Image (spheres, rainbow, N blue to C red):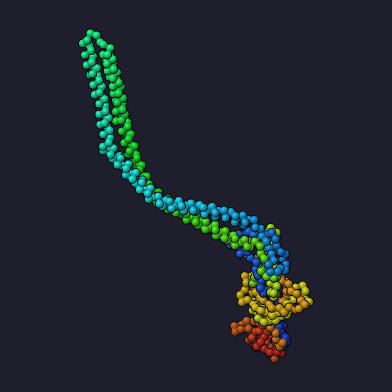
């Protein structure tokens, strides 16, 4: 194909369809999904304070009808009962220990000042003993030893002189009598003994002056220093010991208080190990909250030996007197049109044979986390129909009706600088853009409430 032919095709004017306006019925319908749920439900939740692991030992089936007081679920009690028994023993032991510690603290407070006074006295006496030894007693001891040694030498010299005089006296006689011999022998023995005593005295003197007195000086010096250090240390240790004991008593009290609190909480939690029906009704697994029924997570846990977490709704009791409502969710487009008291019908999913009149009770003004708007419908249950909690329904609501509406394809409207406009064809065949007022839109159809009238023709793009 030549270039000129291609240009000719592109330059041809685009054709547009014409649409004649006529008044006809127009309705805005909303199709939503809903679930039959009770207007009120009693959540079954383990509001335990301490215990966290509730192991199931008995459980009624999902949907079981119960009477007030019937046992719905029972949990294994061995663990909590053993824990409570251990705590009771610990509390009894703690109370005895606390009583002993308080007695010890009382004794320490009474005896610490007296102990400190005694140590101060011991340090003072030790210092005085050392001062007395250095100033007086050591020299007196040395002088005493010197005097004793001197006295022993004098005694030896006296005995030797007496022996010498006896020998001189007896040597003058030609013949020594037996008595004289006895006296001489006795005197010689005395001299010999005094020599021995002198030698011992010399040894004692040397030891006293060279060893005993220096050692005693060192011992007194050490005793003074040790007593002073002990007194100084006691001045720190005794008050600190009292304070540490006081802290120990406080800690024991805190521990005992915590144990008593834990025992009280376990006694509180023990009540949850057998859940009885608070009223007549039906037991359903999961939580019925804010128009939703959550079962998937809990249905996995609600089995024999399953563990139910504390603080979380695991089942719900639907009271026998509770009325079932329909709870659904609307898109933002539906929510903007749905109004309270708008009417429609609901049909059981998979069984459209029964039409159930419904009206809109409430549409949330705020979307949920999923972006949908929670919506509640009030059904008029037929007497021959028995709804069941959890059933799915298809709900159709007519939020707007106009038997003489002018409607156009939604894509015929164009948003201009002054608002919505339509391309309208005049009687002479000319077309022009005309501002119009837009009404409701349903699907691909839009209602026009002003700006055109029946019989006029609009141009569709």
Q: Where is residue 384 drawn, in percent x and y?
A: 77, 77
Q: Residue at x 26, y 37 (%)?
A: 136
For residue 276, what is the image quadrant? bottom right
The image position of residue 97, as x and y in percent, is: 50, 52
Image spot of residue 405 (x, y percent): 70, 87
| Quadrant location of the C terminus in the rendered image | bottom right
| Residue 91 location, quadrant | bottom right
Q: Nearer the viewer, residue 238 or 311?
A: 238
Estimate the x, y position of residue 154 in percent, counting from the top left: 24, 24
Q: Is residue 190 left or right of residue 90?
A: left
- For the N terminus, give its image quadrant: bottom right
Up/down of 445 relative to 283, above or below: below
- As rendered, which of 443 and 14 lies closer to the eye? 443
Q: Residue at x 31, y 27 (%)?
A: 204
Residue pushed farthest right?
353
**Res 284 visible:** no
Q: Is residue 151 above or below residue 50?
A: above
Residue ranking furthest to the top: 174
Q: Is residue 256 above or below residue 289?
A: above
Does residue 403 appear anywhere in the picture?
A: yes
Residue lying furthest bottom: 427
Q: Is residue 181 above or below residue 106?
A: above
Residue in the picture at 59% in, 62% down: 268
State the image quarter where residue 119 is shown.
top left
| Total numbered circles | 0
Which residue does the image show at 53% across and 58% down from the upper left? 258
């Amino acid at each position: 194909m030549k270039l000129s032919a291609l240009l000719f095709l592109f330059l041809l004017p685009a054709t547009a369809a014409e649409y004649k306006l006529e008044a006809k019925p127009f309705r805005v319908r909303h199709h939503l999904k809903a679930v039959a749920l009770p207007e009120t439900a009693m959540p079954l939740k383990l509001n335990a304070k301490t215990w966290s692991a509730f192991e199931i030992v008995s459980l009624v089936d999902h949907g079981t009808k119960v009477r007030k007081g019937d046992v719905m679920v029972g949990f294994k009690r061995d663990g909590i009962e053993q824990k409570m028994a251990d705590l009771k023993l610990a509390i009894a032991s703690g109370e005895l220990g606390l009583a002993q510690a308080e007695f010890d603290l009382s004794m320490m407070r009474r005896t610490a000042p007296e102990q400190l006074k005694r140590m101060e006295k011991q340090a003072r006496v030790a210092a005085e003993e050392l001062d007395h030894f250095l100033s007086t007693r050591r020299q007196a001891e040395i002088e005493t030893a010197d005097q004793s040694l001197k006295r022993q030498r004098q005694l030896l010299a006296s005995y030797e002189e007496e022996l010498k005089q006896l020998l001189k006296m007896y040597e003058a006689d030609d013949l020594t009598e037996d008595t004289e011999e006895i006296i001489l022998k006795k005197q010689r023995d005395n001299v010999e003994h005094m020599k021995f005593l002198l030698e011992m005295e010399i040894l004692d003197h040397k030891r006293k002056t060279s060893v005993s007195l220096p050692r005693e000086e060192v011992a007194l010096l050490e005793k003074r220093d040790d007593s002073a250090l002990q007194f100084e240390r006691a001045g720190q240790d005794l008050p600190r010991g009292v304070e540490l004991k006081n802290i120990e008593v406080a800690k024991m009290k805190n521990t005992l208080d915590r144990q008593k609190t834990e025992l009280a909480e376990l006694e509180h939690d023990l009540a949850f190990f057998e859940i009885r029906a608070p009223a007549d009704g039906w037991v359903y697994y999961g939580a019925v909250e804010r128009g939703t029924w959550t079962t998937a997570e809990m249905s996995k846990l609600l089995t024999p030996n399953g563990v139910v977490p504390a603080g979380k709704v695991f089942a719900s009791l639907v009271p026998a007197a509770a009325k079932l409502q329909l709870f659904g969710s609307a898109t933002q487009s539906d929510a903007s049109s749905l109004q309270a008291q708008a009417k429609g019908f609901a049909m059981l999913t998979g069984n459209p044979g029964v039409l159930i009149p419904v009206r809109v009770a409430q549409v949330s003004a705020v979307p949920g986390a999923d972006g949908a708007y929670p919506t509640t419908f009030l059904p008029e249950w037929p007497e021959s129909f028995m709804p069941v909690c959890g059933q799915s329904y298809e709900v159709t609501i007519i939020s707007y009706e106009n038997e003489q509406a002018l409607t156009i394809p939604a894509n015929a409207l164009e948003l201009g600088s002054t608002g919505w406009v339509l391309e309208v064809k005049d009687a002479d065949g000319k077309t022009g853009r005309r501002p119009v007022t837009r009404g409701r839109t349903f699907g691909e159809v839009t209602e026009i409430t002003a700006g055109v009238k029946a019989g006029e023709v609009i141009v569709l793009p």
